[in-house]
Image: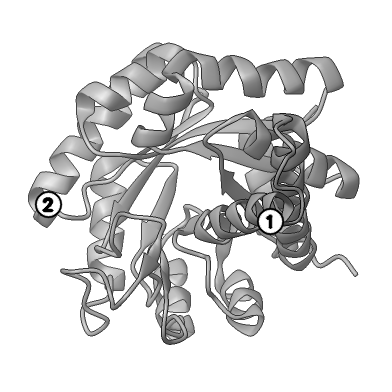
């Protein structure tokens, strides 16, 4: 079975992308695993700080690795958007396959310094762990939005020069830039288009693979172009949350007296699987 690092290298070589999907409970993880296994493609299951607090920092690792070990399947656990060295350390010590330090709201200097500290600690514990850094603020919440997240400016995207300096100075394995992407989905408008030219500029300036955060609400054409330009991992969360909630709501609306969790939650799982499968097909160039 391939390692996460090998799966990423394969995606880069094939100009495909690994799907990264967040989960907050076993139902979300079930949807991620079943969809990926159906298509026989690697997948990353992510948990943000709040999701880790809900599921359990160590419990999330055990859940994902139990699937990997039992089925000998390339599903990996990522500590998504982590905002302090202490919480990066917590994830590294708990055995996550990868971890993201998100210093996007910090100054460039502070972001570099803290990311470098996180990389050094991760390497000292497990040289195989993958560490990702992020430069360029795109918001922090996977939810429905009335307007662009406060502090997000589509006129101030990550530059190739800043990205290159960041990657060299920190030693990260993966890099997530701001290229027109945002966390969450706008309620009353389409999400902004991705700046494909900027993705190409950043990718041509560095050797590490790129990661697209805030993929929910992005058009299929933008996904295809972004992968071709160098994105090797794509994050989806808000779309899953919407699908989950709608599935549960629809089921309870038509079965008001049903109190079996496996019934109404199962409807949510089915909805999530539809979203995940469609994204995995697109990211992996499957018909």
Identity of the residue drawn at 28% across and 45% down:
102
* Residue topped by disc 2: 106
Image-based side of 224 in relation to 42, left or right = left
- Describe the element under mark 2 as helix, strand or loop: loop
Above or below: residue 242 compared with residue 196: above
Q: Earlier in the sequence, mark 1 or mark 2?
A: 2
- Describe the element under mark 1 as helix, strand or loop: helix
Which residue is the extreme one toward the front?
A: 257
Q: Residues within 10 Å of mark 2 (few under 14, many from 20)?
A: some
What scheme was used to colour the molecule? Answer: one colour
Residue 280 placed where, x, y %? 74, 58
Residue 43 placed where, x, y %? 69, 43
Image-based side of 210 in relation to 233, left or right = left
- 133 or 217, which lies in front? 217
Identity of the residue drawn at 50% across and 23% down:
96
Residue 163 placed where, x, y %? 29, 62
Residue 123 seen in this snapshot: no
* Mark 1 vs mark 2: in front: 1
Give the number of the disc on residue 253: 1
Residue 124 seen in this snapshot: yes
Image-based side of 91 in relation to 265, left or right = left
Q: Quadrant of the N terminus?
A: top right
Give the image quarter of residue 124: top left
Disc 1 from disc 2: Cα separation: 45 Å
Identity of the residue drawn at 76% across and 56% down:
254
Identity of the residue drawn at 31% across and 30% down:
119
Give the image quarter of residue 73: top right
Above or below: residue 7 compared with residue 260: below
- 10 or 286, which lies in front? 286
Above or below: residue 276 compared with residue 40: below
Whether the residues at callouts 1 and 2 have beta carbons within 8 Å, the answer is: no
């Amino acid at each position: 079975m391939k390692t996460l690092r090998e799966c990423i290298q394969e995606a880069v070589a094939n100009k495909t992308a690994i799907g990264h999907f967040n989960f907050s409970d076993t139902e979300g993880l079930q949807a991620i695993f079943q969809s990926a296994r159906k298509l026989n493609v690697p997948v990353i299951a992510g948990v943000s700080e709040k999701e880790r607090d809900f599921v359990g920092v160590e419990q999330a690792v055990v859940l994902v690795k139990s699937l990997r070990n039992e089925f000998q399947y390339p599903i990996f656990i990522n500590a998504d958007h982590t905002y302090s060295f202490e919480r990066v350390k917590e994830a590294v010590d708990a055995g996550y396959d990868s971890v993201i330090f998100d210093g996007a709201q910090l100054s460039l200097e502070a972001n570099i310094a803290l990311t470098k500290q996180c990389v050094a600690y991760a390497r000292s514990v497990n040289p195989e762990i993958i560490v990702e850094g992020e430069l360029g603020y795109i918001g922090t919440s996977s939810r429905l939005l009335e307007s662009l997240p406060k502090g997000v400016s589509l006129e101030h995207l990550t530059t190739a020069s800043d990205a290159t300096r960041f990657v060299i100075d920190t030693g990260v394995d993966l890099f997530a830039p701001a290229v027109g992407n945002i966390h969450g989905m706008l309620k009353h408008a389409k999400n902004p288009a991705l700046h494909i030219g900027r993705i190409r500029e950043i990718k041509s300036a560095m050797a590490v693979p790129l990661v697209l955060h805030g993929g929910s609400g992005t058009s299929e054409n933008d996904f295809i172009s972004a992968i071709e330009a160098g994105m090797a991992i794509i994050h989806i969360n808000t779309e899953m949350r919407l699908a989950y909630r709608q599935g549960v709501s629809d089921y309870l609306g038509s079965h008001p007296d049903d109190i079996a969790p496996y019934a109404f939650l199962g409807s949510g799982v089915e909805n999530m699987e539809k979203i995940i499968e469609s994204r995995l097909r697109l990211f992996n160039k499957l018909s």
